[in-house]
Amino acid sequence: MSTNTLQSSTSPARKNTLTSGQRPKWLVPVVMVGAVIVGAALSALLGFNIALWAIFAAVIFLIAAPIAVTVIEGGRKGSDAALTYVVYAAFILAVIPLISVIWTVLARGLPTMSVEFLTETMGGITGMVDQRAADSGEHPPGGALQAVLGTVIVTFWATLFSVPIGLLTAIYLVEYSNDNWLGKIITFLVDVMTGVPSIVAGLFASALFGLMLGPNTRMGIIGAIALTVLMIPTVVKATEEMLKIVPNELREASYALGVRKWRTILKVVIPTSISGIASGVTLAIARVIGETAPLLVTVGYFERVNLNAFNDWMATLPTFIYQQLMRPVAPTAPDPSTDRAWGAALILIVFVMLLNLIARLIARAFAPKTGR
Amino acid sequence: MSTNLSDTERGQDDKQQTSSLASAASAGGRAGDKIFSGLSLGAGIVIFVMLAAVAAFLTWQAAPVVGIPASSVTGGNGFFSYVYPLVLGTLMAAVIALLIATPIGILVALYISHYAPAKVAKPVGYVIDLLAAIPSVVYGAWGMTVLSPALAPFYNWLSETFGFIPLFAGPASATGRTMMTAGVVLAIMILPIITSLCREIFIQTPQLHEEASLALGATRLEMIRQAVLPFARTGIISAIMLALGRALGETMAVALVLSTGGLQWSLLTSGNNTIAAEIALNYPEAFGNRLAELIAAGLMLFIITLIVNLIARTIIARYQEFSGAN
């Protein structure tokens, strides 16, 4: 084929001189189909399954296509094509787990979802009850109400602590520090705080209250403190970014009218950036609502509803999932527990996605115009 | 105090309505300024105190470990021999995760910044951010119930074919709940970090450099090697370091996926453990000396991640000074 086009390039058809030495358009699709067929044959040899087929086909294509391009267009174009296909392959590879996770949560969580699951607790659900449910194959008994309420309460307290501190810190950094040494140190510490492992934050809160109230104290508020440590840096970073893009002209106009700095900040700077701050805070909530490890060591797990964050153990959605998976109610019949775990995972994912969506909507609806 | 001030402010406003705006603002304002700047400074100091408290309380609660006789530490051979397998396990999981996530993360970032058409790039960015938004416990549950069984036959094949390499020594775990699976789950979790940070940097590549390279006849691969990668090298390194910090401290993925045990060189059998998972699995039932041990292990994790993050931040800070982007 390629020699054919080369020879005909002397003929009057000008198109051919421009396209000579280029790969024909059908080349890549043909290689792709070939890779799929050969992949199917190879995987059939080893015992057919779809994953194996996909892997073989992808590998064969990633090797064969650049070689084919190299033969026709030369090594430089060949390696360029190789990178292109590898980039696309990497993208597909990265999306597969996302789809798999979301599909699993939906497929296994939706059957568990019911009014009972959302309105009942695990109180009174013993191994016997679970065993019976597993034997008869009915809907898993019990529910996650206590965990949903616990998550809301703990997250509420964490937000209450971290938003004022984070907001004021960001205001200090942008409006007051003028890049002095203190501002630099605080920026640095916020960066360090971003990297604190969540379990260490939990240990800190637990150690702190352990000293005051005796070891192994578990309360919702301790978990909230742990989450606060994780949430503050996110709030500071988001707010800082937003305050920085408020145009200086607005501040100067306000000062020129004789308005004090604090009033300028409260009445001009913050209203201008409130949408970004709100969406940043929402994203920060979405980040900590799924934290498991710090709650495991600070809040514990409880089968019934406990609305008091200042007393006694509490259930939260992440620890509920962990508990159901690692310590099934009926060790010999773990299926109902696993089902409940996936149901709770679905609720948690819905929470997180809703928060993300809200954040985007806030940001889009009231985004400050940057003038560009 | 503040109610007092607002009262006087209001009083003055009532008396002289026209010309009072400036003076009223200054009467209430001067103190207001002080209060407000004091408050915001105070919030900044709270952060400082909080971090200091994290270090101080962990050290305080971990201190008893020094006094415990070696024989009563878990394992019976002193704290060091208790904790070093955990440190090695933590590093092992993080290294596996990095080896997988770094190339894929960089390639996906390249896809978003240089390959995908503009209309696709933005939604793809959202999708990758979604990966970051999924809670770690859900990844753990997925790794435990979906990924592990799916990988088990592959591990079996790997240990039969490459069993002579100590890392792949058999017999492979039948459940697939191994260090390798934990590493893969961690890789999926840190992928969005690497991708989003690299994407930011790739986008900042001076467009003139790219166009100059293309104008000289470079293919896209050559353009990326000549213009994008040299510009982004330090940024990529710091992105990897930040992802490493996250992988070291990640708890639930390992706690749920791995069936833990003593130190093992093989990645395909059950065994090994990480600091974070050890704490999560044992802390709820721990008391007395055990509590101090676990907190001491947590302190080590804190120090390790702190060092990794400090290195990353230093690189970023140096990079920002020389970056052509600002």
Image: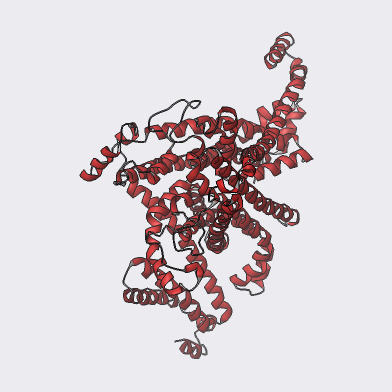
| Picture residue at 62% right of the left edge, 72% below the top | B222
* Scheme by which the image is coloured: secondary structure
Quarter of the image for the N terminus of chain B: give it. top right
Q: Is residue B87 left or right of residue B30?
A: left
**Residue A177 point in image, percent of width and height:** 75, 36
Along the line of sight, which residue is nearer the eye, A262 or B154? B154
**Residue B299 point in image, percent of width and height:** 62, 45
Q: Quadrant of residue B160?
A: bottom left
Q: Is residue A205 left or right of residue B310?
A: left
Query: Across the whole image, how many numbered discs are drawn on residues?
Result: 0
Tell me if residue A308 comes above or below residue B130 in the rendering: above
Q: Is residue B95 left or right of residue B130?
A: right
List the single residue furthest toward the top: B15
| Picture residue at 48% right of the left edge, 90% below the top | A3
Whether residue A152 appears in this view of the structure is yes
Along the line of sight, which residue is nearer the eye, B174 or B43? B174
Along the line of sight, which residue is nearer the eye, A296 or A151? A296
**Residue A206 point in image, percent of width and height:** 56, 35
Tell me if residue A108 comes above or below residue B170 in the rendering: above
Along the line of sight, which residue is nearer the eye, A175 or A205? A205
Q: Quadrant of residue A40?
A: bottom left
Tell me if residue B50 comes above or below residue B77 in the rendering: above
